[in-house]
Amino acid sequence: MIPLHELLFFVLAALVLVISPGPNMIYLISKSITQGKKSGMISLAGIVCGFLFHIIMVSFGLTAVLLAVPVAYTVLKTLGTVYLLYLAYQAIKPKSRNIFEVDKNGSHDSPGKLFTVGFLTNVLNPKVAVFYLSFFPQFIKPEYGSVLTQSLELGVIQVFVSFSINFIIVLAAARVAVFFAENPFWVKVQKWFMASVLMFLAAKMALSKAK
């Protein structure tokens, strides 16, 4: 088992990771505001499963193989970049409903779509895999026991921290819809701001290199 003092430091690092703006947070906030807390929670479930996917890959050494093969990393990075650009286009395309606009017609994405998009938003971000692969080894030591067990232990902690913070985000984001409903000008500002952020993240991902 990993010592408590090291686990506490890891929790702090995981907290910093989850509150950093990124595709997961943007998607989660947008669905929570436009479709309510229930849709936000379903989206969060997909995101959490995306974390579990990366953790399993890292724990069994599969991510190391993936990042060791430049072509494989490039394919995953390209898919993630294209997906972010698609989300940016969806936010600003003509006659599209703003991702932060309250849905007054009661139309909602299906639970399956909410879960799947949340899952893919996380899985198609190679930076998540890079983070786990580069960060976990700092806390894993053979003298603490099974390397696989330690990796899974860190993974469970990270998922718990991520779920807890994102759960709070879902609850808070749903209330922000009232503000946007009463201030239509800021809806347009938010629309272009989110598109700009998504395009920035896409550019940053496209320029990233495998370590």
Image: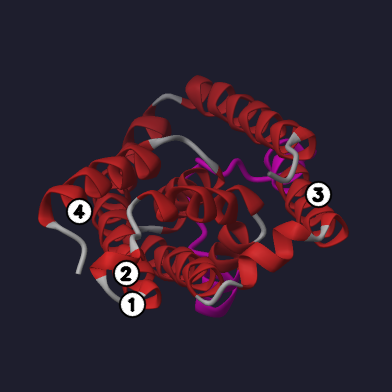
Residue 59 in percent (x, y) is at: 48, 72
Q: Give the alpha-carbon distance from disc 4 to disc 3, as whole Å.
A: 36 Å
**Mark drawn on residue 150:** 2
Residue bearing the label numbered 3: 82
Horizontal arrangement in the rendering, residue 43 relative to residue 169 (left or right):
right
Q: Are there few (<14), some (14-19), or many (20+) residues within 10 Å of tag 3?
A: some
Residue bearing the label numbered 4: 7
Q: Which residue corresponds to the image point at 70% horizontal and 47% vertical from the top-left?
A: 87
Instruction: Tell me whether the residue at label 2 lies in contact with that at label 1, contact meaning CB atoms closer than 8 angstroms.
Output: yes
Quadrant of the drawing holding the C terminus? top right
Q: Is residue 108 visible?
A: no
Q: From the viewer's perspective, is residue 191 above or below residue 160?
A: above
Specify which label sits upstream in the sequence, 4 or 1: 4
Residue type marked 4: Leu
Q: From the viewer's perspective, is residue 151 above or below residue 102?
A: below
Q: Nearer the viewer, mark 1 or mark 3?
A: 1
Q: Secondary structure at mark 2?
A: helix
Horizontal arrangement in the rendering, residue 118 relative to residue 43 (left or right):
right
The prevailing secondary structure element of the residues shown in magenta is: loop
Question: The magenta stretch spans which residues?
Answer: 87-116
**Mark drawn on residue 146:** 1
Q: Which residue corresponds to the image point at 60% horizontal and 65% vertical from the top-left?
A: 117
Q: Which residue corresponds to the image point at 27% horizontal and 66% vertical from the top-left?
A: 143
